[in-house]
Amino acid sequence: MSEIELFQANRPLLFGVAYRMLGSASDAEDVVQDAWLRYAAAPPSDLRSPKAYLTTIVTRLCLDRLKSARAAREEYVGPWLPEPLVTDQGRQPDESVALAESVTLAFMVLLETLSPEERAVFLLREVFDHEYDEIAAMLDTTPANCRQLFHRARERIADRRPRFRDTVEAKRSLVGRFARALRDGDAEALTSVLAEDVGFWSDGGGKVLAARRPVFGRDNVVNVLIGIRRTAAAAGVQLDAVSLDIVDVNGEPALLLRVAERLDSVYALTMADDAIGAIHIVRNPDKLRFLERQLIQGA
C-alpha cells in the first residue's frame, strides 16, 4: 500500500480524533491536511504502526491549537458551541457506543470543560480505545500520568454526561413535535415537549442575534423560543419563507432552520426521559459553512 493510500485509509479516524479534540470540522480538516504534509515529507523508515503514528501527529497538532485558542474562546461573544456537521443516521454496526455518543453536540460541550491534555487522554482512552502506554507515547508523558488525567476527566464530566436512552425513531418524533410547535408559535405545545429543567444555549459569535447567556427552566425557554419567532416576524420575515428540516447532525436528529432558502441556524436537541432536556442553537455563520458544504455535496 502506498503512502497516500495508507493515509486515506486512516483519514476518517484522523478526522474523528481532530474533530472531537477541537470542536470544529473546519479546523479538523486543516489538521488532517497538515498531518499528511508532515507524514509525506518524512515518513519513518521502520514504522510499525502507521495508524498510531498518524494519530500521534494529529493529537499533538490539536493540542497546540487548543492551547492557542484558549484566549480567543475566553473573549468569544456569548456561549461557544462546537461546529455542527451532518452525520449518517443511526450507529454503524461496528461502531462503539462511546464513539457514537462522543460526537453529539451535548457531549462535545462537556469536553470543553476539560483541559487540552485531559481531553486528549479521555478521548484516546474512552472513545478510541488506546492503551495507556500508547497514549503516553503519543503525548510524551508516562502511563501513570495518563491514568490520572483520564480519571480526573471522567469524574469531571460524569455527573453531567448525557444519558442516551431513546431510539433514533423516538428522538425524530420528538424533534418533529418540537418543529411543529415552533413553527406555529404554540407555547403550550412547546411546553409539552420540553423537560422542566431544560437548558438553552445559542451561539451567534457576536455576528448574528443570539442570547448572550444560557437560559434554564421550561417556562423561561418557552418564552425565549416564542420571542425568537416574534422577533423574526417584527423584522419582516414571512412564515412561508421559513423552512424547518430534520437532518441527522452530530449523530442525532436536529432541526435546520432556513430563511428564504438560506441556512440560518441549527437546533441540536438533547433528549432526557421522553422530553427535550437541552437545546443548543448554532447561528454563527462561520460555524455553518462546513455543514452547508456537506449538504450541497450530498444533494
Image (cartoon, rainbow, N blue to C red):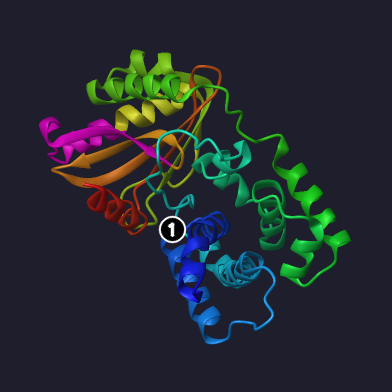
Side of 60 relative to 149 (left or right)? left
Toward the viewer: 226 or 249?
249
Residue 246 falls in which quadrant of the image?
Answer: top left
Q: Is residue 297 above or below residue 252?
A: below
Q: Secondary structure at mark 1?
A: helix
Kind of residue at disc 1:
Ala
Side of 9 relative to 224 (left or right)? right
Residue corresponding to mark 1? 25
Whether residue 233 is in magenta: the answer is yes
Q: Is residue 255 above or below residue 85?
A: above
- Look at 50% across and 40% down and name the residue there: 214
Side of 13 relative to 158 (left or right)? left
Q: Dot 1: few (<14), some (14–19), or many (≥20) neighbours within 10 Å? A: many
Residue 54 falls in which quadrant of the image?
Answer: bottom right
Q: Position of residue 194 (x, y in %)?
A: 45, 20
Whether residue 189 is in magenta: the answer is no
- Look at 26% across and 46% down and name the residue there: 264
- Look at 22% across and 41% down and name the residue there: 258
- Look at 77% across and 55% down and name the residue there: 131
Q: Is residue 33 above or below residue 111?
A: below
Q: Position of residue 83 (x, y in %)?
A: 43, 53
Toward the viewer: 190 or 31?
31
- What residue span does the magenta drawing correspond to? 228-249
Count of marks overlaid on the render: 1
Residue at the extreme right of the image, as rendered? 144
Toward the viewer: 214 or 96?
96
Q: Position of residue 145 (x, y in %)?
A: 85, 61
Residue at the extreme bottom of the image, as rendered? 41
Side of 199 relative to 264 (left or right)? right
Q: Position of residue 236 (x, y in %)?
A: 12, 39
Residue 266 falls in which quadrant of the image?
Answer: top left
Residue at the extreme front of the image, as rendered? 1
